[in-house]
Image (cartoon, rainbow, N blue to C red):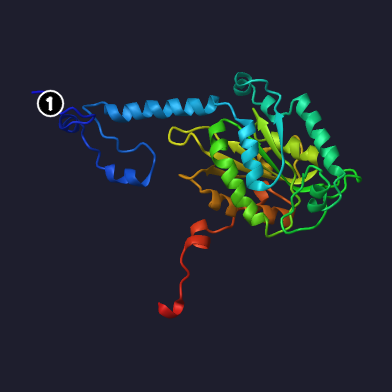
Protein backbone atom coordinates (compact mmCIF):
# COMPACT_ATOMS: atom_id res chain seq x y z
CA UNK A 1 0.00 0.00 0.00
CA UNK A 2 1.39 3.37 -1.02
CA UNK A 3 1.78 6.17 1.50
CA UNK A 4 -0.69 9.02 0.81
CA UNK A 5 1.28 11.69 2.74
CA UNK A 6 2.29 14.52 0.39
CA UNK A 7 5.62 15.51 1.92
CA UNK A 8 9.26 15.46 0.92
CA UNK A 9 9.96 12.78 3.50
CA UNK A 10 7.20 10.37 4.35
CA UNK A 11 7.04 7.57 6.88
CA UNK A 12 7.56 4.95 4.18
CA UNK A 13 10.88 6.52 3.17
CA UNK A 14 12.10 6.45 6.76
CA UNK A 15 11.38 2.74 6.96
CA UNK A 16 13.46 2.08 3.85
CA UNK A 17 16.62 3.61 5.33
CA UNK A 18 18.75 1.64 7.78
CA UNK A 19 20.18 4.06 10.34
CA UNK A 20 23.92 3.91 10.94
CA UNK A 21 24.95 3.27 14.58
CA UNK A 22 27.30 6.29 14.38
CA UNK A 23 24.50 8.68 13.44
CA UNK A 24 24.84 10.55 16.76
CA UNK A 25 28.38 11.62 15.76
CA UNK A 26 27.07 13.64 12.81
CA UNK A 27 26.24 16.55 15.10
CA UNK A 28 29.97 16.94 15.82
CA UNK A 29 31.21 17.25 12.24
CA UNK A 30 30.23 18.44 8.78
CA UNK A 31 31.92 15.36 7.30
CA UNK A 32 29.70 12.88 5.51
CA UNK A 33 29.63 10.04 8.01
CA UNK A 34 26.89 7.70 9.20
CA UNK A 35 24.63 8.40 6.24
CA UNK A 36 22.72 5.16 6.61
CA UNK A 37 21.82 2.87 3.74
CA UNK A 38 18.91 1.69 1.68
CA UNK A 39 19.57 -1.93 0.93
CA UNK A 40 23.19 -1.88 -0.27
CA UNK A 41 22.96 1.67 -1.62
CA UNK A 42 23.28 5.18 -0.26
CA UNK A 43 19.94 6.82 0.57
CA UNK A 44 18.57 9.26 -1.99
CA UNK A 45 18.71 12.37 0.23
CA UNK A 46 22.47 12.12 1.04
CA UNK A 47 23.18 11.39 -2.63
CA UNK A 48 21.35 14.53 -3.73
CA UNK A 49 23.07 16.58 -1.02
CA UNK A 50 26.43 15.30 -2.27
CA UNK A 51 25.63 16.34 -5.83
CA UNK A 52 24.56 19.80 -4.62
CA UNK A 53 27.78 20.21 -2.62
CA UNK A 54 29.82 19.17 -5.65
CA UNK A 55 28.01 21.73 -7.82
CA UNK A 56 28.67 24.45 -5.24
CA UNK A 57 32.36 23.55 -5.15
CA UNK A 58 32.59 23.76 -8.95
CA UNK A 59 30.77 27.09 -8.94
CA UNK A 60 33.19 28.44 -6.32
CA UNK A 61 36.18 27.54 -8.52
CA UNK A 62 34.77 29.32 -11.56
CA UNK A 63 33.15 32.30 -9.85
CA UNK A 64 34.70 35.60 -10.99
CA UNK A 65 35.99 37.95 -8.31
CA UNK A 66 34.12 41.25 -7.98
CA UNK A 67 37.21 43.44 -7.65
CA UNK A 68 35.38 46.77 -7.32
CA UNK A 69 33.10 45.60 -4.51
CA UNK A 70 35.95 43.82 -2.75
CA UNK A 71 38.22 46.86 -2.97
CA UNK A 72 35.58 49.07 -1.41
CA UNK A 73 34.95 46.60 1.40
CA UNK A 74 38.67 46.18 2.13
CA UNK A 75 39.27 49.94 2.19
CA UNK A 76 36.43 50.42 4.66
CA UNK A 77 37.68 47.55 6.83
CA UNK A 78 41.33 48.61 6.85
CA UNK A 79 41.52 52.31 6.04
CA UNK A 80 44.05 51.44 3.33
CA UNK A 81 43.89 52.09 -0.41
CA UNK A 82 43.74 49.11 -2.76
CA UNK A 83 45.51 48.43 -6.03
CA UNK A 84 44.10 45.98 -8.58
CA UNK A 85 46.55 43.54 -10.17
CA UNK A 86 46.40 40.49 -12.43
CA UNK A 87 48.57 37.42 -12.73
CA UNK A 88 50.16 36.26 -15.98
CA UNK A 89 47.24 33.84 -16.43
CA UNK A 90 44.90 35.71 -18.79
CA UNK A 91 41.74 33.76 -17.91
CA UNK A 92 40.35 31.11 -15.57
CA UNK A 93 40.90 28.25 -17.98
CA UNK A 94 44.59 29.07 -18.33
CA UNK A 95 44.89 29.67 -14.59
CA UNK A 96 43.64 26.16 -13.79
CA UNK A 97 45.94 24.54 -16.35
CA UNK A 98 49.06 26.65 -15.75
CA UNK A 99 49.73 27.12 -12.02
CA UNK A 100 53.09 28.72 -12.83
CA UNK A 101 51.40 31.68 -14.52
CA UNK A 102 49.31 32.30 -11.42
CA UNK A 103 52.52 32.87 -9.44
CA UNK A 104 53.67 35.73 -11.68
CA UNK A 105 52.34 39.23 -12.34
CA UNK A 106 51.55 40.22 -15.90
CA UNK A 107 53.46 43.11 -17.46
CA UNK A 108 50.70 45.68 -16.93
CA UNK A 109 50.42 44.84 -13.24
CA UNK A 110 54.17 45.09 -12.76
CA UNK A 111 54.06 48.57 -14.29
CA UNK A 112 51.13 49.51 -12.06
CA UNK A 113 52.92 48.26 -8.98
CA UNK A 114 56.14 50.02 -9.95
CA UNK A 115 54.22 53.29 -10.34
CA UNK A 116 52.55 52.75 -6.97
CA UNK A 117 55.86 52.04 -5.28
CA UNK A 118 57.49 55.10 -6.87
CA UNK A 119 54.63 57.36 -5.83
CA UNK A 120 54.53 56.12 -2.26
CA UNK A 121 58.29 56.28 -1.85
CA UNK A 122 58.03 60.07 -1.78
CA UNK A 123 55.45 60.04 1.01
CA UNK A 124 57.80 61.03 3.79
CA UNK A 125 55.20 62.88 5.85
CA UNK A 126 52.96 61.19 8.43
CA UNK A 127 49.69 59.81 6.99
CA UNK A 128 47.62 62.65 8.48
CA UNK A 129 49.79 65.26 6.75
CA UNK A 130 49.66 63.43 3.43
CA UNK A 131 45.88 63.20 3.58
CA UNK A 132 45.64 66.90 4.41
CA UNK A 133 47.71 67.69 1.33
CA UNK A 134 45.31 65.66 -0.82
CA UNK A 135 47.79 62.86 -1.50
CA UNK A 136 46.67 59.26 -1.82
CA UNK A 137 47.46 57.57 1.48
CA UNK A 138 49.35 54.37 1.00
CA UNK A 139 50.63 53.77 4.50
CA UNK A 140 48.45 53.55 7.54
CA UNK A 141 50.16 53.39 10.88
CA UNK A 142 47.50 53.05 13.55
CA UNK A 143 48.47 55.00 16.65
CA UNK A 144 51.83 55.78 15.06
CA UNK A 145 53.32 58.97 13.62
CA UNK A 146 56.38 57.33 12.10
CA UNK A 147 56.62 58.37 8.43
CA UNK A 148 57.03 55.90 5.63
CA UNK A 149 60.65 54.93 5.10
CA UNK A 150 62.41 56.52 2.16
CA UNK A 151 63.28 54.34 -0.82
CA UNK A 152 66.55 56.14 -1.37
CA UNK A 153 68.71 53.30 -0.08
CA UNK A 154 68.70 50.29 -2.34
CA UNK A 155 66.72 47.46 -0.79
CA UNK A 156 65.59 49.54 2.19
CA UNK A 157 62.22 48.43 3.55
CA UNK A 158 59.44 50.91 2.85
CA UNK A 159 56.81 48.84 4.63
CA UNK A 160 56.68 46.41 7.50
CA UNK A 161 53.82 44.46 5.98
CA UNK A 162 52.11 43.99 2.63
CA UNK A 163 48.63 42.45 2.44
CA UNK A 164 47.80 40.59 -0.75
CA UNK A 165 44.28 39.32 -1.46
CA UNK A 166 44.01 36.76 -4.26
CA UNK A 167 40.98 34.88 -5.56
CA UNK A 168 42.86 31.57 -5.71
CA UNK A 169 40.54 28.63 -6.22
CA UNK A 170 37.55 30.23 -4.50
CA UNK A 171 36.58 33.84 -5.09
CA UNK A 172 33.55 33.09 -2.89
CA UNK A 173 35.87 32.54 0.09
CA UNK A 174 37.54 35.91 -0.46
CA UNK A 175 34.30 37.82 -0.96
CA UNK A 176 32.82 36.39 2.24
CA UNK A 177 35.85 36.36 4.54
CA UNK A 178 38.57 38.82 3.48
CA UNK A 179 37.03 42.09 4.68
CA UNK A 180 35.80 40.89 8.11
CA UNK A 181 39.10 39.13 8.73
CA UNK A 182 41.15 42.22 7.86
CA UNK A 183 38.93 44.28 10.16
CA UNK A 184 39.74 41.86 13.00
CA UNK A 185 43.45 41.92 12.14
CA UNK A 186 43.61 45.72 11.99
CA UNK A 187 42.10 45.92 15.46
CA UNK A 188 45.18 44.04 16.71
CA UNK A 189 47.75 45.84 14.58
CA UNK A 190 46.35 49.21 15.67
CA UNK A 191 47.90 48.66 19.10
CA UNK A 192 51.38 48.60 17.54
CA UNK A 193 53.43 50.40 14.91
CA UNK A 194 53.17 48.78 11.49
CA UNK A 195 53.90 50.52 8.20
CA UNK A 196 51.32 48.98 5.87
CA UNK A 197 51.48 48.91 2.08
CA UNK A 198 48.40 49.41 -0.10
CA UNK A 199 46.34 46.23 -0.26
CA UNK A 200 46.98 44.34 -3.50
CA UNK A 201 43.94 42.59 -4.99
CA UNK A 202 45.05 39.94 -7.48
CA UNK A 203 42.90 38.15 -10.02
CA UNK A 204 43.91 34.63 -11.05
CA UNK A 205 46.57 34.62 -8.35
CA UNK A 206 48.31 31.84 -6.44
CA UNK A 207 50.15 32.01 -3.13
CA UNK A 208 53.66 32.69 -4.46
CA UNK A 209 52.56 35.82 -6.30
CA UNK A 210 52.60 37.59 -2.94
CA UNK A 211 56.38 37.21 -2.76
CA UNK A 212 56.79 39.06 -6.06
CA UNK A 213 54.40 41.84 -5.04
CA UNK A 214 55.96 42.39 -1.62
CA UNK A 215 59.47 42.33 -3.11
CA UNK A 216 58.52 45.09 -5.57
CA UNK A 217 57.00 47.10 -2.72
CA UNK A 218 60.09 46.60 -0.52
CA UNK A 219 58.01 45.10 2.28
CA UNK A 220 59.63 43.17 5.12
CA UNK A 221 56.77 40.68 5.31
CA UNK A 222 53.75 39.65 3.27
CA UNK A 223 50.48 37.98 4.17
CA UNK A 224 48.52 36.45 1.31
CA UNK A 225 44.77 35.92 1.77
CA UNK A 226 43.64 33.38 -0.80
CA UNK A 227 40.63 31.24 -1.60
CA UNK A 228 41.42 27.60 -0.86
CA UNK A 229 40.44 24.64 -3.00
CA UNK A 230 36.73 24.12 -2.28
CA UNK A 231 35.80 21.03 -0.33
CA UNK A 232 32.46 19.27 -0.51
CA UNK A 233 31.46 20.82 2.80
CA UNK A 234 33.45 24.07 2.58
CA UNK A 235 33.37 26.01 -0.71
CA UNK A 236 34.15 29.23 1.18
CA UNK A 237 37.40 28.43 3.01
CA UNK A 238 40.15 31.09 3.02
CA UNK A 239 43.84 30.50 3.67
CA UNK A 240 46.49 32.86 5.07
CA UNK A 241 50.18 32.64 4.12
CA UNK A 242 52.89 34.61 5.92
CA UNK A 243 56.40 35.08 4.50
CA UNK A 244 59.27 37.05 6.01
CA UNK A 245 61.73 38.74 3.60
CA UNK A 246 59.61 37.81 0.55
CA UNK A 247 61.24 37.51 -2.84
CA UNK A 248 60.58 35.50 -6.01
CA UNK A 249 61.65 31.87 -5.91
CA UNK A 250 60.82 31.03 -2.30
CA UNK A 251 59.17 27.68 -1.54
CA UNK A 252 56.44 26.72 0.90
CA UNK A 253 59.14 25.96 3.47
CA UNK A 254 59.50 29.74 3.90
CA UNK A 255 55.80 30.29 4.62
CA UNK A 256 53.48 29.84 7.57
CA UNK A 257 49.93 28.80 6.74
CA UNK A 258 46.66 29.31 8.61
CA UNK A 259 43.89 27.38 6.90
CA UNK A 260 40.10 27.04 6.88
CA UNK A 261 39.30 30.62 7.86
CA UNK A 262 35.51 30.97 7.76
CA UNK A 263 32.67 31.21 10.27
CA UNK A 264 32.14 27.43 10.30
CA UNK A 265 35.88 26.74 10.61
CA UNK A 266 38.54 28.95 12.17
CA UNK A 267 36.70 32.18 12.95
CA UNK A 268 37.96 35.58 11.81
CA UNK A 269 38.86 36.60 15.36
CA UNK A 270 40.69 33.33 16.03
CA UNK A 271 42.61 33.60 12.76
CA UNK A 272 43.55 37.23 13.49
CA UNK A 273 44.77 36.15 16.93
CA UNK A 274 47.04 33.47 15.45
CA UNK A 275 48.30 35.62 12.59
CA UNK A 276 49.10 38.53 14.89
CA UNK A 277 51.21 36.22 17.03
CA UNK A 278 53.07 34.88 13.97
CA UNK A 279 53.58 38.39 12.60
CA UNK A 280 54.99 39.64 15.90
CA UNK A 281 57.31 36.66 16.26
CA UNK A 282 58.35 36.83 12.62
CA UNK A 283 59.34 40.48 12.95
CA UNK A 284 61.10 39.89 16.28
CA UNK A 285 63.05 36.85 15.06
CA UNK A 286 63.42 37.91 11.40
CA UNK A 287 62.19 34.60 9.97
CA UNK A 288 59.16 32.58 8.91
CA UNK A 289 58.29 29.11 7.63
CA UNK A 290 59.48 25.89 9.20
CA UNK A 291 61.63 27.79 11.70
CA UNK A 292 58.58 29.61 13.12
CA UNK A 293 55.96 27.63 15.02
CA UNK A 294 52.50 28.63 16.16
CA UNK A 295 52.81 28.37 19.93
CA UNK A 296 49.55 30.11 20.76
CA UNK A 297 46.90 28.44 22.83
CA UNK A 298 43.40 28.21 21.44
CA UNK A 299 41.53 31.42 20.83
CA UNK A 300 38.75 30.32 23.15
CA UNK A 301 41.19 29.63 25.96
CA UNK A 302 42.79 33.06 25.65
CA UNK A 303 39.89 35.32 24.79
CA UNK A 304 36.56 33.70 25.43
CA UNK A 305 36.97 31.49 28.47
CA UNK A 306 35.67 33.05 31.71
CA UNK A 307 38.34 34.08 34.14
CA UNK A 308 38.67 31.65 37.04
CA UNK A 309 39.05 32.72 40.63
CA UNK A 310 41.14 30.18 42.53
CA UNK A 311 39.74 31.51 45.82
CA UNK A 312 36.32 30.18 44.87
CA UNK A 313 37.48 26.71 43.82
Q: In front here: 221 or 202?
A: 202
Q: Is residue 214 left or right of residue 267?
A: right
For residue 175, what is the image quadrant? top right
Q: In front here: 10 or 245?
A: 10
For residue 111, what is the image quadrant? top right
| Residue 250, horizontal then vertical, whole percent | 72, 38
Q: Residue furthest right?
A: 152
Residue at position x 28%, y 46% in the image = 24
Residue at position x 82%, y 34% in the image = 114
Residue at position x 73%, y 38% in the image = 211
Q: Is residue 133 left or right of residue 39?
A: right
In terms of secondary structure, where does tag 1 sit?
loop
| Residue 157, horizontal then vertical, whole percent | 82, 47
Is residue 275 among what the camera can see?
A: no
Q: In front here: 31 or 261?
A: 261
Residue at position x 57%, y 32% in the image = 171
Is residue 46 among what the camera can see?
A: yes
For residue 96, what is the image quadrant? top right
The residue carrying pointer 1 sits among few (fewer than 14), some (14 to 19) or many (20 or more) residues within 10 Å by Cα, namely few
| Residue 295, horizontal then vertical, whole percent | 59, 57
Q: Residue furthest left?
A: 1
**Quarter that holds the N terminus:** top left
Q: In front here: 73 or 287?
A: 73
Q: Looking at the picture, does residue 268 appear above or below residue 60? A: below
Numbered label tally:
1
**Quarter that holds the C terminus:** bottom left
Q: Which residue is mark 1?
A: 4
| Residue 119, horizontal then vertical, whole percent | 84, 39
Q: Is residue 157 left or right of residue 84?
A: right
Q: Looking at the picture, does residue 159 appear above or below residue 202? A: below
Amino acid sequence: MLCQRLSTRCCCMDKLVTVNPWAELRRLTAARIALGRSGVSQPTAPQLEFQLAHARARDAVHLALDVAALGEALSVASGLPCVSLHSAAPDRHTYLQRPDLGRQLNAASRDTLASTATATATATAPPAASAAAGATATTVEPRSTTPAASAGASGAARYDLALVVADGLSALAIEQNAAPFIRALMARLSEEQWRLAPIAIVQQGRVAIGDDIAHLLHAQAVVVLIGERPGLSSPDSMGLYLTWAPRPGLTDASRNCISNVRPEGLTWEAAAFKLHYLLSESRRRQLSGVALKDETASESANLEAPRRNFLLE
